[in-house]
Amino acid sequence: MLNPLFAIPVGLILGFLAGLGVGGGSLLILWLTLVAGMEHSAARAINLMFFIAAAGSVSFFRWKKGALELKTILPAVIGGCIAAGLCSWIGNTIDQNILRKIFGGLLLVTGIRELLYRPRNAR
């Protein structure tokens, strides 16, 4: 079981990052597997629950501020739900070690992209 003295501050920090749009879920999986010693499949399940709560609250507040238009994001939401369901089904049939390597590679590529990213000049 996770110690609440560590879990609550980590959840707050990752929730803060999610609110900024950084996406604390990847960091949550790393923390749960590397620091808390949790199995990758359990960490993914906890991450999904964290994501539902964080994305829901952040999306609500951004919608209230007028930053989101439902007609614009609805196709992405539908496509994302379909893709998530398919990938979850596929992920349950793949060896956990392969999934770990795929996830690590994705984090590595994303991190390198973020380090090398240069915004385009505003027109």
Image (cartoon, helix red, strand yellow):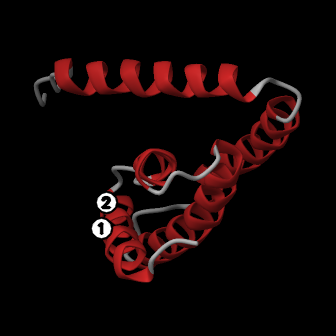
Residue shown at 12%/31% (left/top)?
A: 122
Judged from the image, the secondary structure of the residue bearing numbered disc 2 is helix
**3 on left or right of 119:** right
Name which residue type carries label 2: Leu
**38 on left or right of 30:** right
**111 on left or right of 41:** left
Check whether the beta carbons of the residues at disc 2 and disc 1 lie within 8 A of each other: yes
Name which residue type carries label 1: Ile
**Residue 86, percent across and down?**
85, 35
**Residue 28, percent across and down?**
45, 54
Note whether 81 is above or below 95 in the view shown: below
Q: Examine the image and state in which quarter residue 79 appears.
A: top right
Note whether 90 is above or below 49 in the view shown: above
**Looking at this view, is 108 or 70 the one in front?**
108
Judged from the image, the secondary structure of the residue bearing numbered disc 1 is helix
Residue shown at 31%/75% (left/top)?
A: 9
- Give the residue at mark 2: 17
Note whether 24 is above or below 94 in the view shown: below
- Give the residue at mark 1: 13
Q: Examine the image and state in which quarter residue 20 appears.
A: bottom left
**Looking at this view, is 100 or 22 the one in front?**
100
